[in-house]
Image (cartoon, helix red, strand yellow):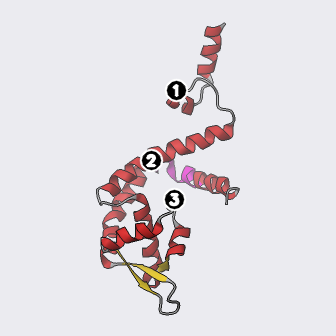
Amino acid sequence: MLVITTILSLIVMSELQKELRQTKPFKSKEEELYLNLARTTEALGWKVVELLKSFELTGVQYNVLRILRGAGQEGLICSEISERLITKDSDITRLLERLENRRLIERERSAKDRRHVITKITDEGLQLLAELDEPVVNLHRQQLGHLGENLLEQLNALLVLARSQVN
């Protein structure tokens, strides 16, 4: 009887259970999905980490540079940068200092409100992002392109829907 139960559990075992070598079923589909998202994020993220590391950047630093490139010549104050980050960083000030030390960004007091420090991307920061643009696009295409446009659109919509109850 134990052999039959084990065989049946292996037949209905999810792909994630197999990857994790987990013999017991998940407590819920929601738990399985959450863990699957975390596992997928980790798997996809490692290649991005490796790419950025070759440019001596972290993912959050790269994100900040992209945010500032999008902000244009007006730049942004620290809190605005923090609000736009993909992954939150509690020590945004230190992160900005590191980027400033590398001359990838510059900061200056606002003429309108001296309490605000405006952060802008430098030409060196723009040049670094320009060097990264194509490799990042190619990496994402390599990682996810096999899904095709239709599935990518559906997955994006599902992820937005999942996040809508969190925010």
Q: Image quarter for residue 104?
A: bottom left
For image coordinates 67% across by 56% down, the residue present is 166
Highlighted magenta segment, given as a residue range: 144-153
- At label 3, counting other C-alpha atoms closer than 10 Å, the crowd grade (few under 14, some 14-19, many 20 or more) is few
Q: Amino acid at mark 3?
A: Thr
For image coordinates 56% across by 45% down, the residue present is 37
The answer to whether residue 105 is above or below residue 135 is: below
Quadrant showing the C terminus = bottom right
The residue lying toward the viewer, choosing from 19 and 138, is 19
Q: Amino acid at mark 1?
A: Arg
Q: Is residue 116 left or right of residue 51?
A: right
Between circles 2 and 1, the one closer to the viewer is 1
- At label 2, counting other C-alpha atoms closer than 10 Å, the crowd grade (few under 14, some 14-19, many 20 or more) is some
| Mark 2 to mark 1 CA distance (whole Å) | 20 Å
Outermost residue toward the top? 1
Give how far across and how far down residue 42 sits, in percent.
47, 45
Give how far across and how far down residue 141 sits, in percent.
42, 53
The residue tagged 1 is 21
First-in-chain label (2 vs 3) = 2
The residue tagged 2 is 44
The residue tagged 3 is 87
The answer to whether residue 161 is above or below residue 38 is: below
* Residue 14 located within the stretch drawn in magenta: no
For image coordinates 52% across by 69% down, the residue present is 82
Give how far across and how far down residue 133 sits, in percent.
36, 64
| Mark 2 to mark 3 CA distance (whole Å) | 15 Å
